[in-house]
Image (spheres, helix red, strand yellow):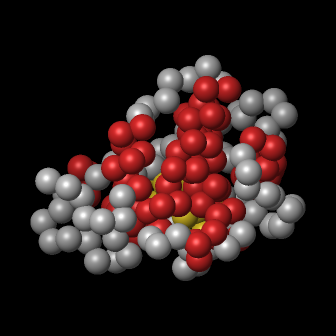
Amino acid sequence: MQKAFQQYPRYALPRGLGRTMKEVTLALLMWIGSNTPLPYDGQDPPEIVTVSQEQLVRLMYEGDVPQGLDVDSVTVDGLYNYRDGKIYLHENLDLAMPEGRAVLVHELVHYLQYQNGLDKSVPCMRELEPPAYAAQAKYLEQHDRRVPFNDMHVLFVSLCAPYPM
């Protein structure tokens, strides 16, 4: 079951971040505009939708989940769907925590990449990953949190060719 955020219902968010999902999203878009080369011109933010793990995996595979894939074995906390312009977040993602907001930062970077036409300048969409991971890492570091991925992970998820064996 999908549910659009009207207001973040479960947690008190940090002071100054805002109380509604739109306020949180706008604050993070402004952070991205100030901390990355991506411009943010104040356009309306994307809709944020929370979904189950299974729904996230289905979205990730565009509905064509490989037969036999255990959806619980796939690690995905969020994704930007360029087809409908929405960001989908795992229903258990805690936006009261910097780690949760960093996932949203990552997806908002993808949103801005598409808004600014950067998707048209790369040979494959995976090449859009490094700036999103860089912004996510910077956000975590500014909040004194450990970055849960390394350069090798970013390189691996950014490869356009099939994965090396």
Which image quadrant is residue 144 in? Answer: top right
Q: Residue at x 59, y 76 (%)?
A: 120
60, 2: nearer the viewer: 60
2, 86: nearer the viewer: 86
Taking 32 as reference, is 64 above or below it? below
Can residue 68 be seen in the rendering of this structure? yes
Q: Residue 160, position in %: x, y? A: 36, 65
Give the left or right position of residue 92, taking residue 108 as reference.
Answer: left
Q: Residue at x 34, y 50 (%)?
A: 156
Which image quadrant is residue 39 in? Answer: bottom right
**Residue furthest top as drawn:** 144
Q: Residue 34, position in %: x, y? A: 81, 44
Q: Residue 4, position in %: x, y? A: 62, 63
Taking 60 as reference, is 100 above or below it? above
Q: Residue at x 41, y 34 (%)?
A: 150
57, 5: nearer the viewer: 57
Which image quadrant is residue 55 in? Answer: bottom left
Give the left or right position of residue 160, taking residue 10 as reference.
Answer: left
How many numbered discs?
0
Q: Residue 78, position in %: x, y? A: 49, 54
Can residue 1 be seen in the rendering of this structure? no
